[in-house]
Image (spheres, rainbow, N blue to C red):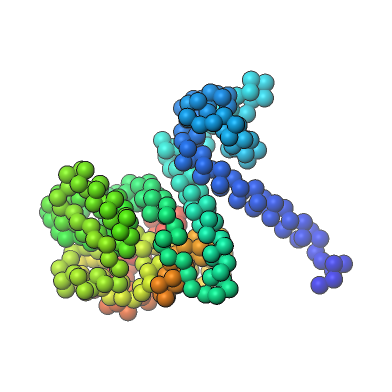
Amino acid sequence: MNAATLDRERLETFEHQLIDTLNRGALCLMISIGHRTGLFDALAEAGQVDAAALAQRAGLHERYVTEWLGAMVTGGIVDHDAQTGTYELPAEHAQVITRSGEENLAVFAQYIPEFASNEDAILTCFREGGGLGYEHFPRFHEIMEEESAQSVLPALREHIFPLVPGLIDRLERGIHVIDVGCGRGRALNELATWFPNSRFTGYDLSEASIRYARDTAAARGLENVGFHALDAARIGEVEPEGGTDLVVTFDAVHDQADPDAVAAGIRHALADDGVYLAQDIDASSSHHGDLDHPLGPFVYTASCLHCMTVSLAADGAGYGAMWGRERARDLFRRAGFRDVEVHKLEHDPVGVFYVCRP
């Protein structure tokens, strides 16, 4: 296209959009650092504080803290009083960026450096195909555990389990529950604590995560929960047919190498009156259908740089996180679930819940 025919207004708008993207992308890195170092928590507790006092409170080097504060101030996250040289985290900001707030969105910023650390290897995949296995994502399960603690666990009793009438009563009386793709076992260990009459089994491909889950269960004295390192596609080989009352998956199906085998294994293990409850990303199965997705660019990036590539690394289907409702329903029905309900809950703007019955 000739430069003279360009829509100058559209060009300038897009240029400003890219500049904003560069700034916000950089802020994600600094927000992750602020979360991991405890700087946001220290700021919230301190009120008005100068850089030296903040560094001392957080046990960090002042020079780095000062430069970090520069990013926070110019990014509109932290207030700065030039006359007193002090900094303050507004109470409203603290609600969504500290561990003591209502919801800590800084947790999600950690994904950006985790994914970006593999850029060179991902470029090779773009050129040659294949994917990157879980060994390329050393902090992924740690971040997922922290995310689960605030997005899944607080909602289980009040919002998620009530999607299945009578489920909480059954858990209190005693049933067998399987968590496929349990990660570090945060959810399952909590459930084992809440419902001592029920029996819980967690499966995950990561041996390190399974060790962590076992150690946590042992430290809490839990005897009604067990964890096993296993490819989820083999659930049908190790679980007896019809021996399970409830199976749950939390954002775990779409990054499997063989999602069909996983779903079929879940159906094999589930009793005829059992329920499979699956949480996944709420999305369409087309790009056009995701234009209004509140976190579309973020989740597609996470999918490309993690969910899809870990599946492709195992010569898998490579569905990715944005596989969407249509593909999910088709998968569950192919596995033998005749009744597939789809629920959108107010507490979760990004997720969707499938209640699947044989």
Farthest bottom residue in view: 334
- With 307 as the anchor, is 173 left or right in this view? left
At a point 57% along the width and 29% down the height, the residue shown is 62
Foreground of the two, 69 or 172: 69
At a point 65% along the width and 48% down the height, the residue shown is 23
Above or below, 269 against 160 in this view is below
Foreground of the two, 238 or 151: 238
- With 218 as the anchor, is 69 left or right in this view? right
The reply to whether residue 295 is visible in this rendering is no
Above or below, 52 against 283 in this view is above
At a point 14% along the width and 50% down the height, the residue shown is 223
Give the tally of numbered discs.
Answer: 0
Q: Where does the image place residue 3, in percent across and percent down from the top left?
A: 85, 67
The reply to whether residue 212 is visible in this rendering is yes
Farthest right residue in view: 4
Specify the quadrant that holds the C terminus.
bottom left
At a point 81% along the width and 60% down the height, the residue shown is 8
Q: Where does the image place residue 236, in percent across and percent down from the top left?
A: 23, 73
- With 7 as the anchor, is 271 left or right in this view? left
Specify the quadrant that holds the N terminus.
bottom right
Farthest top residue in view: 84
Q: Where does the image place residue 246, in percent across and percent down from the top left?
A: 22, 63
Q: Where does the image place residue 310, in percent across and percent down from the top left?
A: 43, 67
